[in-house]
Structures are given as C-alpha cells and as structure tokens.
Image: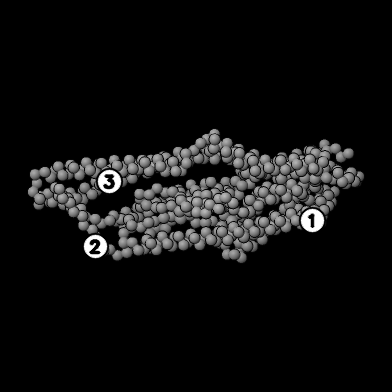
Amino acid sequence: MWKIIAERELRDHLQSTRFLVAAGVSTLLIVLSMWFGIAHYQARVAQHEQAVQMMLDLASEQTNWMMVSAAAFRAPDPMEVLSNGVSSDIGRYSDIGTWRNVRLVRSEYADDPMLAVFQFLDPTFVVMIVLSLIAILFTYNAVNGEKEGGTLKLAFANKLSRAEFILGKLAGSLLVVAAPIVVSFLIGALLLILLGVEMTASHWGRYAFFVLAALLYTMCFMLIGVFVSTLTHRSSVSFLILLVVWITAVLIIPKAATMLAGQAMPVPTADEIESRLTSYSAQARNEQSAEIQKAMRERFRATEGMKPDERQEFFNQNRAKWMQQMDELRKAADQKIADYSSRLYEDYYNQKMGQELLAFSLSKFSPASQLQLAAMKLSGTDTGLKKRYEDAMKTYKAQYSKFVEQKGGGFGMRFSFGRGTSSVSGPDQAAKINISEMPRFQDPVYSFGEAVSASLFDLGLITLVNILAFVGAFVAFLKFDMR
C-alpha cells in the first residue's frame, strides 16, 4: 500500500504548478551557477598562465639568478566551480627568494571588492538556500494538509497502516525533491565536458560525492518538513515554524558560531605575524652586520704596520677564508630567521586551527554548515587550502634557493681592501640565464581519498539529522490525531 501512497504523492506534485515552478527555478539556478563558475574558472586559468609566462619572460632577460624575481602561483582547481569556498579570500601567488617570506598575496577580493560584497553564485549556495526552501515548500503540509482537505480519513478508510502511509509520503516527496537535483547536475556535468574543462577521475569522483551531499541536505529539510507537519494540525502553523527553523539553521547559526569563536579565542592577524617576523629578521640582520663589522676591524688591526704590498698579499691569501666566514654568518642568520618563522607560524596556525575548530563545532548544529563544510572539503576550497599551498611554496623556496646557490647566485663582485681604501670590481658582461634550468613550482596534490575522508564526518552528521528527522516524523505520525 505504501507504493500506492508514494505514487499518488508523486502524481499530485508533478501535476501541480508549484512543482513546475520550483523545479524549473532550481534547475535553472543550478545550471546557471555551474555555467558562471566554469566561465570564472576558465578566466582564472588564463590569468594564471599569463602570470607564469610573464614571470618566466622577465626572468629570461636576466644575467644572474639572484636578479630573478621568482614567484609561485596558485593554480585554479576545476572543483571551484561547485564551491568557491575560501579560494577568492586567499592570495594567488607568493614571491620566492632567499630573503623573502612565503606569503600568499593579491586575493581576488582584494583586486575586485565588488566580488567580496556580492560573493559568488555557486551550486553550494543554490543548494543551501534555494533547495532547502523548496523542500520545505513541498512538505510543510504533507500530513496536516491531508487532514485539512479531508483526504486523510478517506485514505484510512481502506486497509492502510499509519506506517505505510508515512513511508509512502516520504518516498513520494523524496522522488519529487531529488529529480530536479539529479537532472541539474547531469546538465552541469555535460557543461563541464562541452566547455572543455579538464576533469580527472578524482574530480569526477568528488563531483559525484558533492551531488550526494546535495541530495542528503535537501532530503534533510524535506524530512524536517514532514516531521513538523505531523506535529501540528494546521499547515499555516507548520509553515511558520519551518520558516523560523530555516532562518535559524541557514542564516543565524553559521554566522553566530563564527562570531562566538572569534570572541572566545582571539587570534593575531596575518599582518601582525608578518610584522613580528619582519622585526625579528631586521634584528637578526643587524646582529649579522655587527659580526661582520667586528671581523673587518680585526682584519684591519692585523695589518697594522704592514707595507702596502704585504697588506695586499695578506688580503689575497685570506680572502677565500673570509668570504667563507661571511657566508657562514649569512647562513646562520638565515637559519635563525627560518627557525623563528617556523615557530611563529606553527603557533599561529595552531591558534587559528583552534579557533576554526571551535567555530566549526558550534556551526555544525546547522545542516547548512554541515553541507557547506562538506562541499568545501570535496572541492578543495576549505580553510586548509592556504596552508597546503604555503607548505608547498616553502618546500619550493628551499629547492629554488639551493638551485640559485649552486648556480653561483652571487653578484660576482670582487672586493679589494686596504687601510683607508677599498675597491670593487664587477664581473664581465655575462650571458643571459637559461630559464629552462629553473625548477618549477608543483601544486600540492589533493586526492579523491583526502577529499572524501575529510568530508565524511560532515556527511555523516547530515545523514544523522536525516535519520533523526525520519524517526521523529514516523513516531509523531503514529500518535497523530486524524480527527
């Protein structure tokens, strides 16, 4: 009998204007958001390729590797089409060099503040806002509407148990809500193929899990709608209750959780961390300079009483040793700064992770936050994106610095010292560097397994809410007064 109820529920919805409008709007918005996302992704790919090529062109004009303004650029990911996440909030590149700290700069929002004001219309936003409202619209009168229309008593005039009736209602509503979602994302997948977006097997796997997350989230609000409908006897009351639930879950809890976490666990800003590191670096360089000046004074003191020829011979004999000592002082200062930077950023990231963990824990009382976090992790645009790239760029910085040092990246200057006099001679005009030898930055790999394992907890929470709402609706209807 439950199949008959499900068929009737499905038929009633399919024949209603409400379904045609809701399905049409949701499908159109998802497809449009996919199309806009693809266009934005392709524009970013073009910008990324242009920036990399410009950096290489400028580098190829140099005659010394120390003169190269190297940089590592963050490549766009096709999965940003589904959820933009924090991708536009963090920088797109970092300067790379022995004397430069790795820091992502020039975010999209910094370059175009209008994007920060209006944000992106991505499929995650459409599912989170529009589809949850549509699910409520379809189910707010699922049970009490039958009672108000008098069809509930007619249905139970036949041999029909309450369990079969509620199962049929839930199955029919699920099919009605799921159909537009599946069709929309099938069209979206076709757009990705037709518009030439390069998708690997990992990307398609994450895409499928995103669709699953969208279905679970929409089904969650559908079940909550049926549950509230069984608790009230008037559809107008259930609609108002569901509207309050929706506003609280989708709009209030996520933002309130972020604000509370920020107040409970304040974290210094990235600019403050950078300022501390700059101050420490300047202090370390000053100490290095003082050591060099002290060594220079000792060398000049050792030449007192020498004839000019003897003094020059003394400098010539010891120049290699002195240059090695200066290089050791420089390396010691570099290591000191690197160690401090590592400790400083490790402490910063630990504080930041603690704040994020608190914010995410509080926000997970909302299915909307659960969906958004799962979508960001599946898309690779979660809050870990910045750290993944900065870690990869730090590895590249060490690799590039070693390469420059092996290439003799000094300026080739030759120093001659004398009492009260000094001279500097430069190298002969050198040939341009071979840019093909330059090591290339490799983007960090974010695999299918990493994405799924990171999102499993959030998907599990959405599933748990579905189960609780289903059990609640089932039990509540068993006690529902049909008079």
Q: Nearer the viewer, mark 2 or mark 1?
A: 1
Task: State the mark number for residue 351.
Answer: none
Kind of element beneath mark 3: helix
Q: Earlier in the sequence, mark 3 or mark 2?
A: 3
Question: Label 3: how many residues lie within 10 Å, few (<14), some (14-19) or many (20+)?
Answer: few
- Residue bearing the label numbered 2: 428
- Crowd tier of the residue under label 1, counting other residues whose Cα lies within 10 Å: few below 14, some 14–19, many 20 or above: few
Classify the position of the C terminus by image quarter: top right
Q: Nearer the viewer, residue 286 or 375?
A: 286
Tag 1, which secondary structure?
Answer: helix
Question: Regarding mark 2 in the picture, which secondary structure is present there?
Answer: loop
The reply, left or right, for residue 190 in relation to residue 450 is: right
Tell whether label 1 touches label 3 (CB within 8 Å).
no
Q: Position of residue 13 (x, y in %)?
A: 80, 53
The residue depicted at 49 percent of the width and 48 percent of the height is 386
Q: Position of residue 311 (x, y in %)?
A: 12, 49
Residue at image position (60%, 41%) is 255
Q: Nearer the viewer, residue 394 or 351?
A: 351
Which residue appears at 35% of the width and 63% of the height? 61
* Image-quadrant location for residue 123: bottom right
Indicate which disc residue 17 carries.
1
Q: Which residue is mark 3?
A: 328
Q: Nearer the viewer, residue 405 or 274?
A: 274
Q: Earlier in the sequence, mark 3 or mark 1?
A: 1
Which one is closest to the eye, mark 3 or mark 2? Answer: 2
Q: Amino acid at mark 3?
A: Glu
Q: Nearer the viewer, residue 248 or 115?
A: 115
Residues at marks 3 and 2 touching, judged by CB atoms closer than 8 Å: no
| Picture coordinates of residue 367, whole percent (x, y) | 66, 43
- Amino acid type at circle 1 is Thr
Q: Give the spatial CA distance, label 2 vs label 1.
A: 82 Å
